[in-house]
Image (cartoon, rainbow, N blue to C red):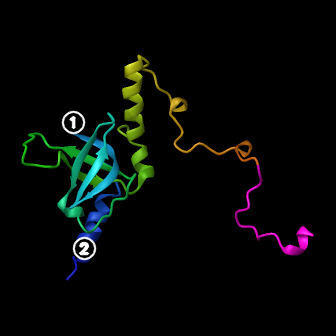
Amino acid sequence: MGRPKRNVLAAAEDTLLPPTALSPNQSVVRVIKPEGNNLYTCEFPDTKTRLLELAQRFRNTIWIRRGGFVLAELYDGQSEEVRAEGEIVNVVRNEKQWRKQPYWYVDLFLLSSAQATGNTILTYASRPKEFPEASDSDSEEESTVGKMPPSDSESD
C-alpha cells in the first residue's frame, strides 16, 4: 500500500518556501550524482564534494535530479561508522523564490572568490550569467532544424 496522500502533499508543501535564514551548519548545494540508497554526492560552495543522505520525510516522495539544488545540513560529530557527512533537509523546487534569498549558491561562490582576490564589493552587474545568449555569428550556416529535407526536383 502506498503512502497516504497527506504525507506526500505535506512534504511537497515544505519544499516550496525557502527559509529566511540558515544555521551555521546549513548551506545550499548542487547535486552532482545519486549514489543509491538515498545517498547523493553534492558540491558545496567551497567546491568540496561530500556525500549526503536524503531526509526520511522526502524518501519516495520528492525526487532529486542531477544538477538540482538542495539545502544540506552537515553532521556535527563525525564518526567513522557513518558513511554520509550530512543530510539533505530541504529540496529546492521553486528556484525563483530561492534565488532571491541572500544565502543563494551563486552569491556564495562570488563571495569566496572575491575574498580570495581581495575584491569585497560585488554588484548585481558583476554576477556571472548562467546561460549566456547565443549570438548569430556563432553559427556559420543556417540551421535546418524543423525544416523539410530538400526535394529531388529542386536539386535539378
Q: Amino acid at mark 2?
A: Arg
Q: Residue at x 55, y 45 (%)?
A: 131
Q: Which of the 4 image quadrants contains residue 114?
A: top left
Residue 55 picture location, percent across and down: 20, 57
Residue 11 picture location, percent across and down: 26, 64
Is residue 20 shown to the viewer in this render? no
**Residue 81 drawn above or below residue 120:** below
Secondary structure category for the residue under label 2? helix
Is residue 108 shown to the viewer in this render? yes
* Residue 6: mark: 2
Secondary structure category for the residue under label 1? loop
Residue furthest out toward the top: 118
Q: Does label 1 or label 2 sit earlier along the sequence?
A: 2
Quarter of the rendering occupied by the N terminus:
bottom left
Q: Residue at x 74, y 61 (%)?
A: 144
Q: Residues within 10 Å of mark 1 (few under 14, many from 20)?
A: few
Residue furthest out toward the bottom: 1
**Residue 77 drawn above or below residue 67:** above
Give, as a single range, the part of the protein colored magenta. Answer: 141-156
Q: Is residue 154 magenta?
A: yes
